[in-house]
Image: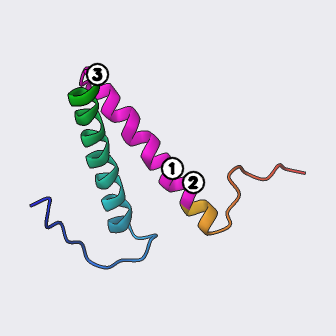
């Protein structure tokens, strides 16, 4: 079922689009940690998966902000 994962076409701001990005980040993190275990003998821990998935979601969020010309930090109150 994961190989044929199809989602409806949505705008980037819709909840369905954001949810599929989070699912993609979790899948990427799972595989990343799995292959680290296979090739590097790194222990497979859920905390590692959460750390990698969180970093990927943060990266996607920053890329979205850059694509929309949104500053990465709030503007200071003057």
Disc 1 element: helix
Q: Position of residue 15 (x, y in %)?
A: 37, 65
Q: Is residue 56 left or right of residue 61?
A: left
Q: Quadrant of the N terminus?
A: bottom left
Q: Residue at x 13, y 67 (%)?
A: 4
Q: Residues within 10 Å of mark 2 (few under 14, many from 20)?
A: some
Magenta region: which residues?
Answer: 41-63
Marks 1 and 3, how far apart at CA? 23 Å
Find out whether the residues at labels 1 and 3 contact each other: C-beta distance under 8 Å. no
Name the residue beneath numbered marker 3: 42
Farthest left residue in view: 1
Q: What number of labels is visible?
A: 3
Name the residue beneath numbered marker 1: 59
Disc 2 element: helix
Q: Position of residue 66 (x, y in %)?
A: 63, 62
Farthest bottom residue in view: 9
**To which quarter of the image does residue 35 belong?**
top left
Disc 3 element: loop
Q: Position of residue 63 (x, y in %)?
A: 55, 58
Q: Is residue 11 above or below residue 23?
A: below
Q: Residues within 10 Å of mark 1 (few under 14, many from 20)?
A: few
Q: Is residue 22 above or below residue 10?
A: above
Q: Residue at x 24, y 27 (%)?
A: 37
Marks 1 and 2, how far apart at CA? 5 Å
| Secondary structure, magenta segment, majority class | helix
**To which quarter of the image does residue 12 belong?**
bottom left
């Amino acid at each position: 079922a994961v190989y044929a994962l199809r989602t409806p076409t949505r705008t980037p701001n819709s909840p369905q689009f954001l949810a599929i990005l989070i699912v993609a980040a979790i899948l990427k993190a799972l595989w990343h940690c799995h292959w680290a275990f296979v090739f590097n003998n790194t222990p497979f821990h859920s905390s590692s998966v959460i750390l990698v998935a969180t970093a990927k979601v943060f990266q996607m969020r920053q890329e979205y902000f850059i694509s929309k010309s949104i500053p990465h930090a709030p503007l200071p109150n003057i």
